[in-house]
Image: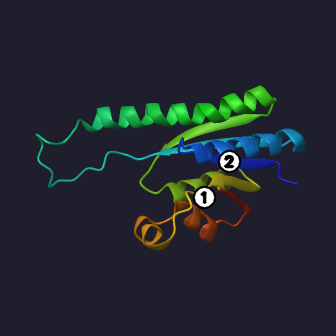
Amino acid sequence: MFKTILVPTDGSERSDKAIATAVDYARHCGARLIGISVAEPYPFSPLAESSMAIDPALYEENVKTLANQHIKKISDAATAAGVPCQTEIVMSFNPDEEIIKAAQLHGCDAIFMSSHGRSGLSRMFLGSKTQKVLAHSTIPVLVLR
């Protein structure tokens, strides 16, 4: 049914569940995976005192290294299962927008992603990246809790 599946990861255990589900599905159905990790750029604030701020280049290098570790979980799992896989890391403050763009760019049929399961005030204030993907996606989104 699905031939190209996008799998976003933030490195959490919940994301690991989405990765395992996507790899298993792809292996059984002959699909390929597109893995994406969205790293957040340095939150520059012109009002911050320079003595208190960390080096933006060092910060971005660290978040890219962390994103590489997250994305490696997808490629390793796919390789072990014999599933074709392509991965990418994107720097953005809006992971939900980057997930939607990646799905369109790679011609994905579905998105397999996790949800942190927040509810109530924490969901309202923190927002839900998964909810935003669900609201704006034109393809099916399988949400794993």
Label 1: element kind: helix
Q: Amino acid at mark 1?
A: Ile
Does residue 44 appear left or right of residue 117 in this picture? left
Label 2 vs 1, first from the N-terminus: 2
Does 145 sit above or below residue 70?
A: below
Looking at the rendering, which quadrant does residue 42 occupy?
Answer: top left
Does residue 128 appear left or right of residue 84 in this picture? left
Q: Amino acid at mark 2?
A: Ala
Q: Which residue is mark 1?
A: 100
Looking at the rendering, which quadrant does residue 24 occupy?
Answer: top right
Q: For the point 54% across and 54% down, which residue is it?
A: 98
Looking at the rendering, which quadrant does residue 51 occupy?
Answer: top left
Percent x, y of residue 113: 65, 53
Q: Which residue is mark 2?
A: 18
Percent x, y of residue 103: 66, 54
Percent x, y of residue 89: 53, 40
Q: For the point 88% across and 54% down, which residue is it?
A: 1
State how the image is colored.
Answer: rainbow
Nearer to us of marks 2 and 1 is 2
